[in-house]
Structure formats: structure tokens, C-alpha cells
Amino acid sequence: MNELIIGDRKIGPEHPPLVIAEIGINHEGSFDKAIQMIDDAASVGCECVKFQTHVVDDEMIPNNVIPGNAKESIWEIMNRCALTKEEERELKKYTEAKGMIFLSTPFSRAAAVQLEELGVLAYKIGSGECNNYPLIEHIARYGKPVILSTGMNNLESIEKAVAILRKHNTPFALLHCTSIYPTPYDKVRLGALEELAQAFPDAVLGLSDHSLSNYPSLGAVALGARILERHFTSDKSWPGPDISISMDPTDLKELIEGSRAIFQALGGRKNVLKEEQPTIDFAYACVVAIRDIRAGEELSMENIWVKRPGTGEIKAEHFDSLLGKKALSPIKQNEQIRWAHVNG
């Protein structure tokens, strides 16, 4: 069965969704802010927080490219926001002491090496690295579970990444994603989850969402998503390029509770449950006499009808079968009719 295990947390179709609070770089390089976000995520029952690991010199060359959701170059942003290895070590230790899973996305080979030295349990690979096959190969060799976001990639390029993971027998999940910040609802495209399920039946599926609410993530659960990732901040008034698309602790709590409720509501069959019997007892209608009926009198619309409660022997569904039959004994007005009251 397609299933991931990170620590002692099983993730897959038979398990409640894992909600990942992506702290990312919302700490803006502040260790104290990072600690606060871990605390706030833990306080609402979150199981997993995710950071980003940037070893800038190994990740990129100096450049002036400005992301669509920022006003400064990616070079400046990452140099300001990158945490040190020791800071990440402390954050991992702090997260795990609270019983949570620590994840981080490496954006370079050096970052992956750093995380491996820290002993991470699994790897998250971002959409920008979905077609960075050399980096995926490097991470896959570690043999640890990989959660791969697939924004900005089609099935053909995802297939090449998956082939690498399969080659190394690396357990993996694929997160559908749209790399627009924020993502309009009509660009979320939850239908892609079905495509991923058909193309990669051995993958755990999920959604990494950049829209402005929990709605797409909650809808994704019904379509098979078992990992839900959204950016997270303690305070939406903080500065930072990802803050505007981030959920706060209240949103995070609602996402966790909502996703679990939807998961519990899935499946089943259209049958009558034994737990519905108390409602049946008052809600169903049964056949009753609407006036006194003499022995030998023919049952008709003038002397029988259907009324609640549903505690009688003959339910409303059998009403028509009684018409034209004769009463074998007197029946009082408002008495629930029994099969023994009528001839065969």
C-alpha cells in the first residue's frame, strides 16, 4: 500500500491527513521568531513544522531576480533569512522535544548534506527542485522518505523525478501545487490530484497550497490528499514575502480539525445504521386507524392512514398493500395496525 512512515507517524490513504505548517522563511532570519512559531503551531495540535535550509553560495549565484511576491532580489532575501546550521540543530531539537516532526526543504546539495548531518527523518523537496534531477538523485540516495512538491511541472517532468525515487526504493509523496502567490481559487486545480493518482498509484498524495484560505486543502482531503501544507506565521502583520499567503494559529487549528473531520466522514455505504434506530422510532410513519374499524370492514383511504411514530409493525412503505384487505378484529382509532389485524 502507498504509505510513508516518518518517525512513528504513518501517512497514506488509511490515515488522517498530516498537516504541515510551513514556517519556511517567515522568521526573516530571527531565531526567536522561529521558536515562537514552533510554540504556536504546537499549541493548536500541529504534528509537523517545516523550515527551509539555504546555503546560499551553494544554492545560487549572485543575481538581481525579484520574486513575484517580493520587492527585493532572491539573493538578498535568502542571505537575510538563512539560518545557521547550529540554529537549525536547536530548532530541530526544540521541535522534537514538543513531540512534533521537524522537516526542512534543502535548496542545494550542501543544504541536503547539512540536514543529513542533523539527522532529519525525511526530506521535503520544493517545486523549484522537482526537475532538479541531480539534487533529487543526491537526496534519494539517503533512502529516507521524500515529500515532493510538483508546482511548475507537468506529468512528464514529474515522471523523471519519480523514476529516480523508485530506483533508490525511496518512499515518496507527491504534493500537487500551483506556484502562484497567492493562488486564485480557479488556478488551484484540485482535479490534478486524480491525474497524479492515476499516473503514480504508488505515491501518497497531498496538496501544497498558496491560496488565501483553508478551503482548497479541505476539499483536497475528499479527493485523496493525505498531506496538507500551507505557509504559517504567528502574526499576519509581520514582514516577509510569504506572510500574505500564510495561515495563523487560528487558521492552522481549523485546518487540522477540519481535515480530520472530513477524513472521518469519508467512505461507507448507503445503508441503514443501527445507531439510526432511535431516530427511526420517532421519524418513520406507520399505518394507523384514523377512525374505529369494525371486524370484517374493508380497509380503505377513509379508515387508515400513516402517522408517526415509527414504532408500529407496519411501516408506511406497506400502506398500499393493506388497501382492500378486511379487518379480522375491531381496531380502535389511532391504533397502530398489525399484520394480525388483517386477512392474508
Image (tube, grey):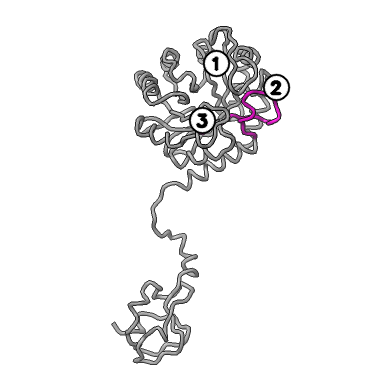
Q: Which mark is residue 118?
A: 1
Secondary structure beneath disc 2? helix
Q: Quadrant of residue 44?
A: top right
Q: Nearer the viewer, residue 11 or 200?
A: 200
At label 1, the amino acid type is Leu
Q: Secondary structure at mark 1?
A: helix
Query: Would you identify the image quadrant in which residue 166 lies?
Result: top left
Q: In which quadrant is the N terminus drawn?
A: top left
Residue 332 on image: x %, y %: 45, 88
Kind of residue indicated by mark 2: Asp
Which region of the structure is painted magenta?
228-248
Residue 246: in magenta span: yes
- The secondary structure type at the circle numbered 3 is strand
**Which of 144 and 146 lies nearest the eye of the viewer?**
146
Please name the residue that numbered disc 3 is placed on: 208
Precedes in sequence: disc 1 or disc 2? 2
Question: Would residue 5 be seen by someone viewing this image from the given angle?
Answer: yes
Mark in the foreground, 2 or 3: 3
